[in-house]
Image (cartoon, helix red, strand yellow):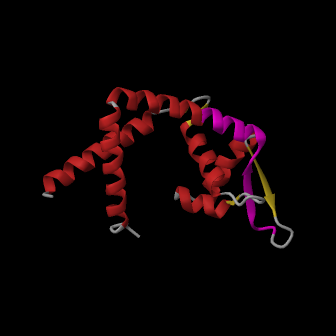
């Protein structure tokens, strides 16, 4: 691959990022709330939840920034915080029933739009794209920036 293809891929990825950044709402929740709720949902220990530190690391933002985000989600009753008796410095966050329901509704809304988009592409092109994206992912795993 010459540098020209590298530039094209970079430009295309930027276009997708721009679309994502311009998406304000997913269903009834904001894009940022969706990302955080999904992260909590997928990263949580079955009983305790996910630590604020883990959220900070995954989102690549400071713990104070995560705390502000969680405050907003707590005010909406989407999440709750808990700490352990052994070490009160470790704070866990988990979804409430309202948070689970809101995330599920947003996910359904996201999937509905995604299915419409892929419906317009057609089944054959969609399968080709997904196969190539899977291949690209595996190759990129060998080149991840650490």
Please say whether residue 29 is one of the residues in the magenta stretch.
no
Vertical order, 120 against 68 (above or below): above
Q: Residue at x 68, y 48 (%)?
A: 70
Residue name at image x 62 percent, y 29 percent? 28
Residue occupying the far front of the picture:
124
Q: Is residue 127 above or below residue 91?
A: above
Q: Is residue 96 magenta?
A: yes
Residue at (35, 33) in percent of width and height: 123
Q: Is residue 62 left or right of residue 78?
A: left
- What is the residue that sits farthest to the right in this orientation? 85
| Image quadrant where one finds the N terminus | bottom left
Taking 143 as reference, is 131 above or below it?
A: above
**Number of marks present in the image shown:** 0
Residue 52 showing in the rendered view = yes
Residue 131 in the figure: left or right of residue 76: left
Quadrant that contains the C terminus:
bottom left
Find the magenta span and give its range.
Answer: 88-106
Q: Percent position (x, y) of residue 50? A: 69, 59
Left or right of residue 98: residue 31? left
Estimate the x, y position of residue 120 in percent, counting from the top left.
35, 26
Instruction: Between residue 71 and residue 85, name the one nearer to us.
Output: 85
């Amino acid at each position: 691959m010459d540098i020209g293809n590298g530039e094209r891929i970079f430009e295309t990825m930027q276009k997708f990022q721009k679309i994502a950044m311009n998406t304000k709402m997913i269903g009834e929740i904001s894009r940022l709330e969706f990302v955080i709720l999904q992260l909590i949902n997928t990263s949580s220990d079955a009983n305790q939840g996910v630590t604020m530190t883990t959220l900070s690391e995954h989102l690549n933002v400071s713990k104070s920034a995560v705390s502000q985000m969680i405050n907003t989600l707590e005010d909406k009753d989407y999440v709750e915080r808990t700490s352990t008796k052994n070490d009160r410095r470790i704070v866990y966050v988990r979804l409430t029933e309202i948070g689970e329901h809101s995330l599920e509704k947003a996910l359904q809304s996201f999937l509905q739009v995604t299915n419409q988009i892929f419906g317009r592409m057609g089944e054959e092109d969609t399968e080709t794209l997904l196969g190539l994206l899977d291949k690209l992912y595996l190759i990129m795993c060998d080149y991840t920036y650490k």
